[in-house]
Amino acid sequence: MLDVTSAHAIADDARVRANVVRLAAAQALTGANSAVIFATGAIVGSTLAPDMSFATVPISMYVVGLAAGTLPTGAISHRFGRRAAFVIGTALGTLTGVLGSFAILHGSFALFCIATFLGGLYGSVAQSYRFAAADGASAAYRPKAVSWVMAGGVFAGVLGPQLVQWTMDVWQPYLFAFSFLVQAAVALIAMGIVAGVDMPKPAPADLHGGRPLRAIVSQPRFIAAALCGIISYPMMNLVMTSAPLAMKMCGLSVSDSNFGIQWHIVAMYGPSFFTGTLIARFGAPKVVAAGLLLEAGAAGIGLSGLTAMHFWATLIVLGVGWNFSFIGASALVLETHRPQERNKVQAFNDFLVFGMMAIGSFSSGQLLASYGWSAVNLVVFPPVVLGLAVLSLVSWARRRKARLEAAMGEFPDAI
């Protein structure tokens, strides 16, 4: 019996590791999709939009797509398996590139917004890669699985902005039109990779059962995890979305902007090679807290100057802060549900994160146009303070409960 159990454990471990490799590769290619949109969206928007205050609407539509796709992704994964959702997502990514290129060639702002919305749907599917990597993994390996998949984004940080740099002038005078067409080809390659992920359809027993969603999401641990995700991702997005246009308004070049976005994305995903180890050693709450503090530090740098170096430093520190806070929050979510509950809980968590991000994203263009780059950075501080306070309170309550339970076990008559 022990030999059979051991054989199953080894087989499951090998399957999980193989999936991690594929999902990390898919993360890299999918990240190129978002990198193209974030590097070009505000600039194309300022060219096509009827008013400068609408310049960041295409990126906001991408974020709306992220929010809109989370619950359907969970439902498709629950009913047909994760692999089906992954293939549908890459198909939407291909359509994003084709439609985006067409919109630029024909000068259609509305069509370009639809393209970025579809890109957001693709991105929402890709957000489930990190959770999918943990399916079947041991409790100790889950944070590392999540972290390694996120590490694939390092290559997105190189590929996406460089793709824009190499292709933005190919179809003059239609800036970035060819970039989107190449992005469609990258999505097709990603489709071939995710099609080979070894994730069978859910067993009939897994389609039913589990606790009600309300009971799961009312846990203090889930509330803290979701709130920190809601703060870390939207605040990062607010600053990142505004940065390319702010750099342009300050007289900096597109190359300067591309360089900043490239290293921002590298900073977002580069720490993933060791974030899982940090979580295993120090615990997810401490890693999340460090990430939120780094995001606040990035805003402080943004307030200190308007040179290219200031923008680059802001984006790099912001990326590292997002990595720690978002991966840490994702690890906390994994602690709140049972295997049969994972799809609905993970999808609901991402819906909260990207729903709030969508609301904030629509205000970023108006905020930048009306009040400037300083206002964008100042907005970061209050949510970060709130997140740190809630995280500290929940962690303190959890430690206190553990001490009381230990005391009751040792001295049952004392309590």
Image: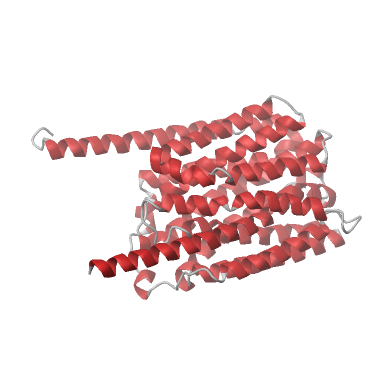
When the figure is inspected, residue 18 is found, relative to residue 290, above or below; the finding is below
When the figure is inspected, residue 333 is found, relative to residue 388, above or below; the finding is below
Horizontal side of residue 384 vs 259, given as left or right:
left
Q: Hey, which residue is sitting farthest bottom in the picture? A: 204
Q: Hey, which residue is sitting farthest top in the picture? A: 304
Horizontal side of residue 240 vs 382, given as left or right:
right
The quarter of the image holding the N terminus is bottom left
Q: Hey, which residue is sitting farthest front in the picture? A: 3
Q: Hey, which residue is sitting farthest left in the picture? A: 413
Q: Residue at x 71, y 67 (%)?
A: 95
Task: Please name the colour scheme applied to the rendered image.
Answer: secondary structure
The quarter of the image holding the C terminus is top left
Locate residue 308, reporting x and y percent. 76, 32
Q: Residue at x 44, y 62 (%)?
A: 16
Locate residue 151, reporting x and y percent. 56, 50
Q: Residue at x 51, y 41 (%)?
A: 324
Locate residue 171, reporting x and y percent. 88, 59
Marker count (numbered): 0
Q: Residue at x 25, y 38 (%)?
A: 402
The answer to whether residue 92 shows anywhere in this view is no
Quadrant location of residue 90? Answer: bottom right
The answer to whether residue 369 shows anywhere in this view is yes
Residue nearer the viewer, 144 or 108: 144
Quadrant location of residue 109? Answer: bottom right
Locate residue 377, reporting x and y percent. 65, 32
